[in-house]
Image (cartoon, rainbow, N blue to C red):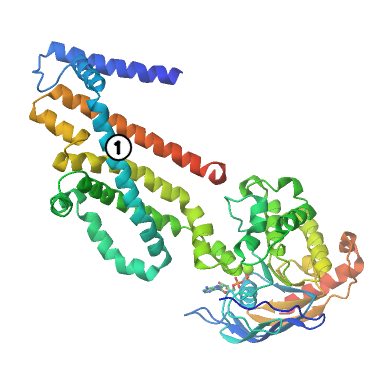
Amino acid sequence: MPTEPIAPAPPGAAAITLAGVGYAPPGHPPILAGIDWTVPAGAFHALLGRSGCGKTTLLKLTAGLLPPGTGTVCLEGRAPQGPAEGVGFVFQTPTLLDWSTALENVLLPLSLRRGPRRGGRDRALALLDGLGLGSLAGRYPRQLSGGQQARVAIARALVDSPRVLLLDEPFSSLDALTREALQEDLAALCARDGVTALLVTHDIAEAVFLADRVVLMAAGRITGEVTVDLPHPRPPGIRYDPGFNARCRVLREALDRA
Amino acid sequence: MIHRLTHLLLLVALLGGWELACRLVPLPELVLPRPGRVAAVLAEELAGGRLLRHMAVTAGEMVMGLAAGAAFALPVGALLAESPALRRLAHPYLVASQVVPKLALAPLFLLWFGFGMRSIIVITALVCFFPLLENTVTGLGRVDASRLELFRMLRANRWQTLLRLRLPTGLPVILAGFRVAVVLALVGAVVGEFIMGREGLGAAVMAAQGMMDTALMFALLLAIAALGSAAYQGALLAERLILSERFDS
Ligand SMILES: Nc1ncnc2c1ncn2[C@@H]1O[C@H](COP(=O)(O)OP(=O)(O)O)[C@@H](O)[C@H]1O
Ligand SMILES: [Mg+2]
């Protein structure tokens, strides 16, 4: 289902708009109901909620991997049928191709795409380099640690220069140190390219560190929204700042109320 | 090294036991020839070039039968893997054709394709077809939902998904099907030759039986075993080369 290329939205315009979105798997009660949400172009939003509350389902609806049962999903002003061009997705598990090297995995989106793709190899290598995998580009996934595989998956989602990036708990299986390092890399990459990002997480500190705005979800509904008014770029040390912790507490209490 | 030595010792013991048994219990040569006699016939047949020609004919039928079987099994398997509806539709027919012994169709093929190599190749192809089909459908269907979702997200079309995702995922299973099919191809070719061969190892076994030359039959059976082992080892080697380090798990 090819859709025409979408012109980049001007900054401040809505990149993602969900209006009255609901979803029920065939023969099951609804998982999501009445979701209204707008992510401006270039913004970084986080979706925070307990596991099982419908976060993955909402992200897949946004990506066009699932058709909404009710309401509409708009990406950059259009309501595409199926996955749209210019959208990158990082799945909850790395889902790399075992028979391809790290570099080949990163290049997959370009090699599947028809049309021009000059300089793809250089860009892929630069992304791997930026994520600290420059020397491991020739390795197969089984020769990489979980954290390294997660980095390859992020590089793969970024290689085709997406304007919108959707991430489903991309760091949830990693140790705390690796997770924080990857959060910093992700923030830098998104800021540099002006990418609109929507991050699903159940980690409160991760949401506060990365997001401009955090949407809280419980049992398939949005239960609150909190703006994180910390300046960008956020240095790693900000995690020990009293202001940072105060915002984590606010989110924690909001989650408990929901 | 120790391993090889053990193998060799076992072989010598078996042959020695066979020779000894023949000397102690004087069986008529028609029933069980001595190994020395079989070896002599084997050497004679090899030197005369007859044995090698029969082996070449049988090997040729195996290769052509396998190729023909694969030429049908792989595309049909891909089609069935792609379409669950088609799979459901074809399933009863596939089961029915599985349970019919393929060799029971020999008289029919004799009628359709004539006496000789063409019919034997058709039988061989048919015998190879089912394991190849089964493993192709299983292999191509083995891909997990999350990788299919990835390809959907990357807007890959069906053809790309088949070639770049389903095929590499299923390759080990499909190649295992080939390994099975190679051995079955030998069965198909030899038994086909029993029924309607002018040349080849199976035809030669029937001829030897007609001449009541049991030693020659034993020599031919050894040649069949050698051909089968070589084919199996060849398939294993090809499998290892194709899978190489990319698919090393
Ligand atoms: N295909 C499906 N059929 C039935 N129930 C589903 C299906 N997919 C998800 N669910 C249910 O919907 C809820 C939300 O799932 P999910 O979106 O994966 O949650 P989260 O990502 O927040 O952990 C869960 O309770 C899950 O059991
Ligand atoms: Mg989830």
Residue topped by disc 1: B59
Q: Nearer the viewer, residue A196 or A203?
A: A196
Are there few (<14), some (14-19), or many (20+) residues within 10 Å of tag 1? Answer: many
Q: Residue at x 44, y 58 (%)?
A: B140
Q: Nearer the viewer, residue A18 or A246?
A: A18
Please state the chain letter of the residue tagged with numbered disc 1 in the rendered image: B
Q: Residue at x 11, y 30 (%)?
A: B209
Q: How many marks?
A: 1
Q: Is residue A15 left or right of residue B224?
A: right
Picture quarter with ligand 1: bottom right
Assign a secondary structure to mark 1: helix
Image coordinates for residue B216, horizontal then vertical, percent: 17, 24
Q: Compared to A8, does B219 lie above or below?
A: above
The image quadrant of residue A226 is: bottom right
Q: Compared to A30, does B237 lie above or below?
A: above
Q: Compared to A251, does B239 lie above or below?
A: above
Q: Is residue A11 left or right of residue B30?
A: right
The image quadrant of residue B16 is: top left
Kind of residue at badge 1: Ala
Q: Is residue A145 left or right of residue B96?
A: right
Q: Is residue A171 visible?
A: no
The image quadrant of residue B237 is: top left
Q: Is residue A257 left or right of residue A84?
A: right
Name the quarter where the C terminus of chain B is drawn. top right
Q: Nearer the viewer, residue A248 or B191?
A: B191
Q: Is residue A161 visible?
A: yes
